[in-house]
Image (cartoon, grey):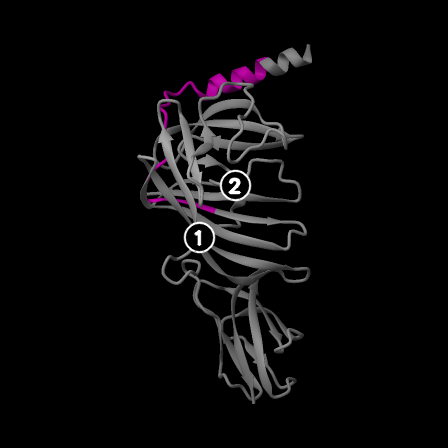
Amino acid sequence: MSRYLLLVNLLALSFLGLSQPVEYHVFPTSNAIWRTSFSGYQVGYCTEYQDETAGDTIINGLIYSKIQRLGIWYSENPELGCVFGGYYSEYMGAFRNDSIHRKILFIPNEQSHDTLLYDFNLNLFDELPTSYLFDPNQSNGIVTQIDSILLGDGFFHRRYQINIGIAEYVDIIEGIGSLYGLLSTIEDPFEMGSYLHCFIRDGVIVYQNQETTVYPCNLIDKVNHQPAGAQAVSIAPNPVIDMARVILPPIIERGDLYVFDILGTEKMVFKTLSNDSLLDFSGLMPGIYVYRFFQGRTMLSSGKIIKM
């Protein structure tokens, strides 16, 4: 009896969401950005990146939209969390819309034939088909709910809730893709995973994940490969004899400063600094040191100190 009631409730929820007239939304082929992050327990690294449309290309006589990834990677430190490692930019592949069948097809980098990326022609209790993102041999994937959601573009988009494990779900939204990220594997995120923080089209935030507000929709700048709005933290005077001050840009209110020698050994820590906070370096031996400025577990800036 309880199983019957569960089925009735799932059907009711699904049809309730689709009571609004919903047209099929294709993936945008220009001016689209998927802002995502990846991290996990004992993974060894974490990364923040954005996948964005980067012009068209013709493959096998068909027009595809290219996807370029721009990101920042961090190495994981047991004490400091994600420590800045560097910037990267890479071509991920290209996709095309098959609007008739409500599918998105994808050709990964260095391959010549496309494969299924997303299938939006799904019904309640359908199994998720094999695709570039999903391997049924590795995980189960069942459509447990279909509804619609009003997004920032002013339109209702169909939303598919996929059960991919015990109490693990991911939503897939027409015109956006998986809330794990555009090209992120759809699987049970045991101890690690990717999460889409926002989707922007034509400069408008169409979707923003309200559950990850700790990650605002801050984009990575195309020109200098740094987070938009991020500015360097500096120490003055530098070289320093004994006392100096930390200079924070307006976007940063406070944080922690760690000082290391050239071998990577931690020498000093200054906690909860605000702009113009006084720093006492009198305990350091003369030499060259590296400083790293953290906000929480994320490094925002780094530089060198010359101690006289």
Viewer-proximal residue, 182 or 154?
A: 182
Q: Position of residue 65 (x, y in %)?
A: 35, 40
Nearer to us: label 2 or label 1: 1
Q: Position of residue 146 (x, y in %)?
A: 49, 22
For the record, the magenta segment spans: 8-35
Q: Residue at x 47, y 23 (%)?
A: 147
- Disc 1 crowd, CA 10 A, few/some/many (<14, 14-19, 20+): few
- In the rendered structure, which disc, 2 or 1, sits on the residue that comes first in sequence? 1
Magenta span includes 31 = yes
Q: Which mark is residue 239?
A: none
Q: Position of residue 90 (x, y in %)?
A: 44, 52
Q: Residue at x 52, y 41 (%)?
A: 184
Q: Which mark is residue 90?
A: 1
Q: Residue at x 55, y 63 (%)?
A: 84
Q: Amino acid at mark 1?
A: Glu
Q: Position of residue 294 (x, y in %)?
A: 56, 64
Residue 110 relative to residue 163: left or right: left
Viewer-proximal residue, 133 or 159?
A: 133
What residue is pinned by disc 2? 184
